[in-house]
């Protein structure tokens, strides 16, 4: 187990706080984040890429809780946003818009104007039409918009098809020839300046080869852009560094750095990274309480109060999360290192939520030690793409969130009330 979530005295701790205590105090389902884990990941990224003086732009969409963004901002961090809403969050959390890059395939004129007003570092531009829109809005505001074309290097990141973005047939970015045509067009637009080149090839990438391949294409593209007269000073390699959900499957960031740094160095650019998952993924757990245990035929269903509306990753990407009791009962131990192998004293269970969908599960055929109604379960590696994708499906209030720092724990988002859920709906009764 890692230092931030560990089993002590037969119970799970986040840093120096007992998870069971937090569940009592704040209720379930509950997301719990470790501040030290987030800081350690940010520091690790800075150290691994230090040679290129990187701007580590935390990808807000992975976990956009204001308390998390404040942790990043306090470390002098930079941000990657994909909407006007995320930009607002960065500003409210005390982040610096001048260290913020604005990505996303569908920026509206209003979002472009707000980003120019805020003074973002640059726009990652995904199409010719978007470049035209940025040029028009910037010109009307008497500004020059700093931009970086998003280039699709056509590499296969070998990840789930829903989170693979760098192949030719993706909706994201432009393939190389098209991005160079865009650079030619941009050279004639006085209200835009191409100061960078952007790529983001996918998410949960666990091998370094796709990055190495993409980076060397990037160096050539930057050379070509400079020949067209653009002052390219930033090589934005995007995010996508994978994490270990099972244990040990992802490479440490230092290995990614070893593959990326020597290639990017040739471009004489400063490096931008847009890591999301690797910063927060393993810094969070989702805690739930068992409502019923239901046996039907051969199957055992553990029905607990976290559902697909709280954590949709298993349903959406068939993804794996380690799950284990917060306070294992007598005879049971800390979670095993290897969830794939047979584990003595366990039963294979489907761990499901109360939502009316067959896709509502956190795990299927999963080994669990003996548990009873009312026990707490921890779903690990839930810090990224968890709460941000939560919905109110089945009119379920979204989970509360807590940020732990050493021996202190602060509520980072209180649980929604049913009245709040219904408030925006207009009906005459
Ligand atoms: C989602 C996204 C990221 C972050 O991806 P991770 O896999 O969480 O690191 C970075 N850049 C862009 C453009 C994205 O869309």
Image: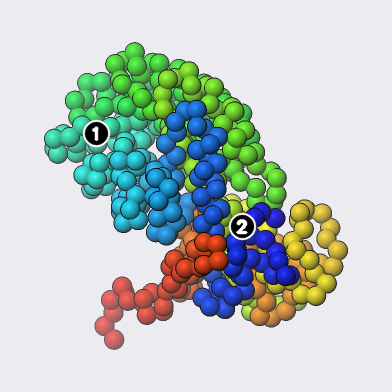
**Residue occupied by mark 2:** 4
* Residue appearing at x 69%, y 70% in the figure: 11
Q: Give residue 428's quadrant in the image.
A: bottom left
79 sits left or right of 255 in the view: left
Alpha carbon of mark 2 to alpha carbon of mark 1: how far?
A: 42 Å
Q: Nearer the viewer, residue 307 or 94?
A: 94
Crowdedness of circle 2 by 10 Å Cα count: few (<14), some, many (20+)?
many
* Residue appearing at x 51%, y 50% in the figure: 39
* Residue appearing at x 48%, y 73% in the figure: 396
Report helix, strand or loop for mark 2: loop
**Residue 64 position in % (x across, y down):** 42, 55
Q: How is the image coloured?
A: rainbow
**Residue 63 position in % (x across, y down):** 46, 55
162 sits left or right of 327 in the view: left
Quadrant holding the C terminus: bottom left
Q: Give residue 259's quadrant in the image.
A: top right
Q: Residue furthest right?
A: 344
Report helix, strand or loop for mark 1: strand
**Residue 321 position in % (x across, y down):** 65, 57
Mark 2 vs mark 1: give the one in front: 2
The circle drawn on residue 145 is 1
For the question of whether residue 202 can be seen, the reply is no
Q: Is mark 2 within 8 Å of ligand 1?
A: no
408 sits left or right of 423 in the view: right
Quadrant holding the N terminus: bottom right
């Amino acid at each position: 187990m890692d230092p931030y979530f560990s089993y002590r005295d037969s119970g799970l701790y986040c840093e120096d706080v007992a998870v069971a205590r937090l569940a009592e105090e704040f209720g379930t389902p509950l997301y719990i984040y470790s501040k030290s884990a987030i800081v350690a990941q940010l520091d690790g990224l800075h150290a691994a890429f230090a040679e290129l003086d990187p701007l580590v732009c935390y990808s807000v969409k992975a976990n956009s809780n204001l308390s998390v963004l404040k942790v990043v901002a306090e470390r002098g961090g930079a941000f990657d946003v994909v909407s006007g809403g995320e930009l607002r969050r960065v500003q409210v959390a005390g982040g610096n818009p001048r260290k913020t890059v604005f990505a996303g395939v569908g920026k509206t004129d209003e979002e472009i104007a707000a980003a120019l007003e805020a003074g973002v570092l640059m726009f990652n531009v995904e199409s010719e039409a978007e470049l035209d829109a940025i040029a028009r809005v910037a010109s009307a505001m008497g500004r020059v918009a700093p931009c970086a074309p998003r280039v699709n290097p056509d590499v296969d990141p070998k990840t789930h098809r829903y989170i693979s973005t760098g192949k030719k047939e993706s909706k994201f970015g432009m393939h190389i020839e098209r991005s160079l045509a865009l650079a030619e067009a941009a050279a004639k637009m006085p209200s835009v300046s191409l100061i960078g080149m952007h790529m983001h090839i996918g998410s949960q990438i666990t091998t370094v080869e796709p990055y190495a391949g993409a980076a060397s294409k990037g160096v050539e593209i930057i050379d070509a852009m400079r020949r067209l007269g653009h002052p390219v000073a930033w090589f934005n390699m995007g995010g996508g560094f994978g994490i270990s959900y099972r244990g040990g499957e992802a490479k440490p960031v230092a290995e990614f750095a070893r593959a990326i740094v020597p290639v990017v160095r040739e471009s004489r650019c400063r490096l931008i990274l847009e890591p999301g998952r690797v910063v927060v993924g393993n810094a969070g757990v989702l805690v739930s309480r068992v409502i019923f245990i239901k046996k039907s035929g051969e199957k055992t269903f553990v029905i607990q109060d976290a559902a697909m509306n709280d954590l949709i990753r298993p349903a959406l990407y068939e993804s794996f999360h380690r799950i284990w009791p917060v306070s294992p009962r007598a005879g049971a131990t800390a979670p095993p290192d290897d969830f794939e192998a047979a584990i003595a004293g366990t039963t294979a269970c489907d761990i499901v939520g109360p939502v009316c969908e067959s896709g509502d599960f956190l795990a299927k055929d999963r080994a669990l030690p003996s548990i009873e109604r009312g026990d707490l379960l921890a779903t690990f590696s839930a810090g990224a793409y968890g709460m941000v994708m939560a919905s109110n499906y089945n009119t379920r209030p979204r989970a509360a969130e807590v940020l732990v720092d050493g021996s202190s724990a602060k509520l980072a988002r209180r649980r929604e009330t049913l009245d709040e859920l219904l408030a925006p709906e207009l009906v005459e009764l």
